[in-house]
Amino acid sequence: MKNLLQQIEESKKFILSRIKNAPKIGLILGSGLGSLANEIKDPVSIDYKDIPNFPISTVEGHVGQLIIGALANKEVVAMQGRPHYYEGYSMQEVTFPVRVMQAIGVDLLIITNACGGLNSQLYPGALMIIKDHINLTGDNPLLGTNYEELGPRFPDMSNAYDRNYIELAKQVGKNLSIKLHEGVYLGISGPNYMSKAELKMCIKLGADTIGMSTVPEVIVARHGGLKVLGISCVTDMAIPNQLVSISHEEVINVANKTKPKFIRLVKSIIEEVEL
């Protein structure tokens, strides 16, 4: 059986054989936000199913392909959709694309998601810069064998989200007159939405938003030394005493309405990034 290093190397070689310039910025595009990849110039599109060892996304709103090219005059690789833990993948499989991004030379990872709002100051369509996270998935992608080539056995997560990029994002938002919130994202396994009692617990723990992705990817990115900027798109409110039933289709709908604002923000952040 191939070990993780061998699997990463196979994926790396395949992707680099298809492109001219190795990207320095990686993008993971959450539910309904994948159309940002359509802004990439001179794109090379690679279906996940064609990349050796790559997990395939099966969820609506996640196209399932890598788009590599220029965005705001920077070389980027965008995941148009992501695999999730609740699809039956292991945490190592969910985060495998981040390992491959590290291998092909990515330095900055911009992770986005659609999520529920727990803070009453938020609202459907709000954008929140993630300053920290809480892992309530019940699992960790770093369990098992640690390969020193990928990162240290005990990585520090006390500053998982890069403060300099947070400040840059806030300044860009101000320049564009896009209101940005800042808060704590809580990651769960899914796929069910949480009960009222569970949501009350999450609020007491200090979470501002809640979702079913992002945290494992951030853990692996930081393990590998990548800088991380996280952006959440609030698609519904998950405050227990205001709770209304929500469907995945409604989540996608709100994300679609927020796309123009989201695309302007991310493109402008990338334009300002210095690597």
Image (cartoon, rainbow, N blue to C red):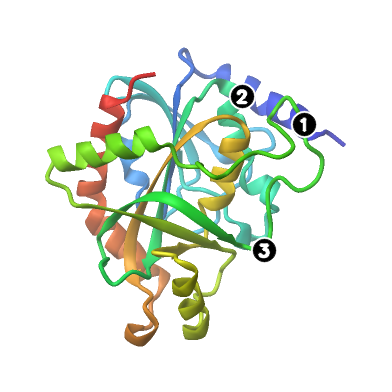
Residue 263, placed above or below residue 30:
above
Instruction: Name the disc covering residue 147, or none.
Output: 1
> Where is the N terminus found, in terms of image quarters?
top right
Mark 3 or mark 2: which is in front? Answer: 3
- Whole-angstrom CA distance, mark 3 to mark 2, is 27 Å
Amino acid type at image mark 3: Gly
Amino acid type at image mark 1: Tyr
Is residue 50 visible in the rendered image? The answer is no
Residue 252, placed above or below residue 27:
below
Instruction: Name the disc covering residue 103, or none.
Output: 2
| Percent coordinates x, y for residue 92 in the rendering | 69, 46
Secondary structure category for the residue under label 1: loop
Residue 144, placed above or below residue 60:
above
Instruction: Name the disc covering residue 20, or none.
Output: none
| Percent coordinates x, y for residue 156 in the rendering | 61, 40
Query: Which residue, given by chain and number where applicable, does mark 3 sit on?
Result: 138
| Percent coordinates x, y for residue 63 in the rendering | 45, 48
| Tag count | 3
Mark 3 Cα within 10 Å, few/some/many (few <14, many 20+)? few
Residue under the image location 47 percent in, 84 percent down: 196
